[in-house]
Amino acid sequence: MTVTCVYVHVKPEHVQDFIDATTANHLESVKEKGNLRFDFVQQADDPCHFMVYEAYRSDEEAAAHKSTPHYLRWREAVADMMAEPRKGMKYNILQPSEI
Amino acid sequence: MTVTCVYVHVKPEHVQDFIDATTANHLESVKEKGNLRFDFVQQADDPCHFMVYEAYRSDEEAAAHKSTPHYLRWREAVADMMAEPRKGMKYNILQPSEI
């Protein structure tokens, strides 16, 4: 099982648009085969900073996410909303061992 | 709903001990009232870096975690395993809106 944390710094004037676009992406992503989590969170002390916590059963299923219409729509929609390039961190899940 | 991401950099010689101690903490933490997630992940490109992704239904339930015997045991057990002080980041959950 594999996790990607995507950290996004959004321009202040685009915060609500970013929330709307990422919520739409979340709602489709959780239906994908192999998706375990697609949590969308906002930093408590800075509303311009967000993180998407994406967990998939396999690397292949995680990679397939990047070819979905909803991901491609999201990527295009948010490109000009970001204050700096987003950063992705990859992790392996140790626990829970069964989800 | 609230999330804390705890980032831990562990000394190489303590990686397995840290995995054991944090797995024990995970197994009890997921039984706590209000706990939604307590995922324990290891950075894919650096096995000395870990993250614990903790989600609780309320701030009060998240705070209560820090008084549990398993958390206190973990805190003491891992104190000397860390290469630098651990860092916590607080987030508010936007999606999923129902978990």
Image (cartoon, coloured by chain):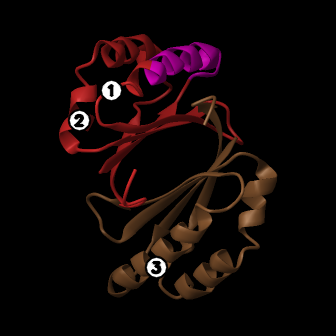
Chain colours: A brown, B red
**Front position among marks 3 and 2:** 2
Chain of the residue under the numbered disc 1 shown in the image = B
**Looking at this rendering, what residue extends furthest in the right direction?**
A60
**Front position among marks 1 and 3:** 1
Say if the magenta span includes residue B13.
yes
**Residue range of the region highlighted in magenta in the rendering:** B11-27
Quarter assignment of residue B91:
bottom left
Chain of the residue under the numbered disc 3 shown in the image = A
Q: Secondary structure at mark 3?
A: loop
Chain of the residue under the numbered disc 2 shown in the image = B
Residue on which disc 2 sits: B61
Q: Which quadrant is the N terminus of chain A positioned in?
A: top right
Would you say B80 lies left or right of A66 here? left
The amino acid type found where label 1 is placed reads: Glu
**Residue at image location 46% in from the left, 79% down from the top:** A83
Asked whether disc 1 touches disc 3, contact meaning CB atoms under 8 Å apart, the reply is: no
Label ID, residue B32: 1
The numbered mark, 2 or 1, whose residue comes first in the sequence reads 1
Q: CA distance from mark 3 to mark 2?
A: 34 Å
Tell me if mark 1 has few (under 14), some (14-19) or many (20+) residues whose alpha carbon lies within 10 angstroms of its own.
some
